[in-house]
């Protein structure tokens, strides 16, 4: 690599407004600034992300995020070589706010603009943090996404499978709600599960009996609901111990499904004869200690490197968008000043669309 590139990234596809400045050069890649302003507080009373509130908050916050990121990096707009913005998939109002902000900045500065697929941002992150070589296998597992991707190039993704209904993070959140725990539910359920007995309640492992890598989590959530109702009817309420055991059983069932489907995805990945096989995870659910440890153990058994970027880069952020822009620029993919916001945008155009649409918008 002969030339250093400095990119601004902008992300607003769900409930985080984010801007980041990244520099990639002969001396390596440095995140000069990464600003993420979550909207959790604005949506808390509604039990989920409200698209109109999200869109307005992005429109009000994004330029402040850009300003903060530039200040933190000590750079001016004129120091940038390019701008990259999430152009989909996601909640359309938020994506539009980001695209309009980026177009305005690009027009004002004359800097080239790249529209980035949000999922490509997640999927390329292992190359930002670990220099992962193509092809690698990726599991995106968050509140809005759940899919296995075979990443063969900067613009070359094959979906091997994904959820046909809820994403696992969504299921964690719903289970937390059913059991009277706070949101976001994942960390709460994990905390309760730590002292619970995962074997007391037999919960289903959906779709394990079906071939392939597709997954389903909505039935699991319903099974938790039925078990809870049974306990409440029998004892007149949910005891603390019951709640812990139910959380442990649920978490264990999710882990079993993810491990078995990952084993199958790894078998498909191996047919592509990767020189240095790697399995990367991203998304909030990858923060779960039990799930992470189980996936890591699977990789050790399979002789595959396990790559887990730091959490701040696994969850929604703009550094991954700037990085995806730099990757595209490096291989000569042209900028596109006329990008449009796309609510749905499957990474793998050849794969059949997934059924689930989910709380956090299109899963693509
Ligand atoms: O990637 P993320 O920050 O946002 C998107 O969904 O795009 O993921 C958030 C999701 C939430 O559903 C949250 O409950 C889940 O990740 N999560 C967890 C844990 N920490 C966050 N799920 C299970 N265990 C955790 N420790
Ligand atoms: Zn995301």
Image (cartoon, rainbow, N blue to C red):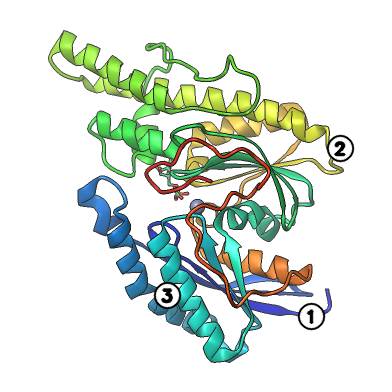
Q: In whole angstroms, how far apart are the C-alphas of marks 1 and 2?
A: 32 Å
* Residue 74 makes an appearance in the image: no
Quadrant in the picture for residue 31: bottom right
Mark 2 to mark 3 CA distance (whole Å): 42 Å
Residue denoted by label 2: 273
Q: Nearer the viewer, residue 250 or 105?
A: 105
Label 2 neighbourhood size at 10 Å, few (<14), some (14-19), many (20+)?
few
Give me the disc on residue 360: none
Percent from the top left, x then y, of residue 275? 87, 43
Residue 65's disc is 3
Q: In the image, which disc is placed on residue 3?
A: 1
In the displayed structure image, the side of residue 125 where residue 270 appears, left or right: right
Query: Is residue 99 shown above or below 301?
Result: below
Local SS, label 1: loop
Precedes in sequence: disc 3 or disc 1:
1
Q: Which of these two is toward me, 241 or 164?
A: 164
């Amino acid at each position: 690599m002969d030339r250093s590139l400095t990119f601004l990234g902008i992300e607003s596809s769900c409930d985080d407004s984010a801007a980041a400045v990244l520099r990639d050069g002969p001396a390596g890649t440095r995140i000069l600034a990464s600003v993420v302003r979550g909207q959790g507080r604005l949506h808390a009373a509604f039990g989920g992300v409200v698209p109109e509130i999200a869109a307005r908050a992005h429109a009000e916050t994004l330029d402040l995020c850009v300003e903060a990121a530039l200040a933190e990096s000590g750079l001016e707009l004129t120091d940038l070589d390019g701008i990259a913005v999430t152009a989909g998939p996601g909640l359309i109002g938020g994506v539009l706010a980001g695209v309009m902000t980026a177009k305005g900045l690009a027009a004002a500065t004359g800097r080239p603009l790249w529209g980035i697929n949000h999922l490509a941002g997640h999927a390329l992150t292992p190359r930002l943090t670990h220099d992962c070589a193509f092809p690698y296998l990726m599991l995106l597992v968050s509140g809005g996404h759940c899919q296995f991707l075979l990443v063969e190039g900067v613009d070359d993704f094959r979906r091997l499978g994904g959820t046909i209904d809820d994403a696992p993070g969504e299921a964690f959140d719903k289970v937390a709600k059913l059991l009277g725990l706070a949101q976001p539910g994942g960390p709460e359920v994990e905390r309760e599960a730590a002292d619970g007995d995962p074997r007391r309640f037999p919960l289903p492992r959906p779709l394990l009996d079906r071939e392939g890598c597709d997954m389903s989590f909505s039935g699991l959530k319903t099974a938790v609901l039925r078990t809870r109702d049974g306990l409440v009817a029998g004892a007149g309420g949910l005891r603390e111990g019951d709640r812990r055991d139910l959380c442990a059983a649920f978490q264990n069932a999710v882990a079993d499904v993810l491990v078995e489907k990952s084993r199958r995805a790894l078998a498909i990945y191996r047919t592509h004869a990767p020189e240095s096989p790697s399995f990367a995870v991203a998304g909030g659910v990858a923060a779960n200690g039990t799930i992470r440890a189980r996936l890591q153990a699977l990789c050790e058994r399979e002789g595959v490197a396990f790559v887990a970027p730091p959490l701040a880069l696994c969850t929604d952020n703009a550094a991954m968008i700037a990085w995806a822009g730099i990757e595209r620029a490096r291989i000569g993919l042209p900028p596109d000043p006329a990008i449009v916001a796309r609510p749905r945008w499957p990474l793998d155009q050849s794969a059949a669309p997934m059924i689930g649409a989910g709380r956090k918008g299109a899963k693509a």
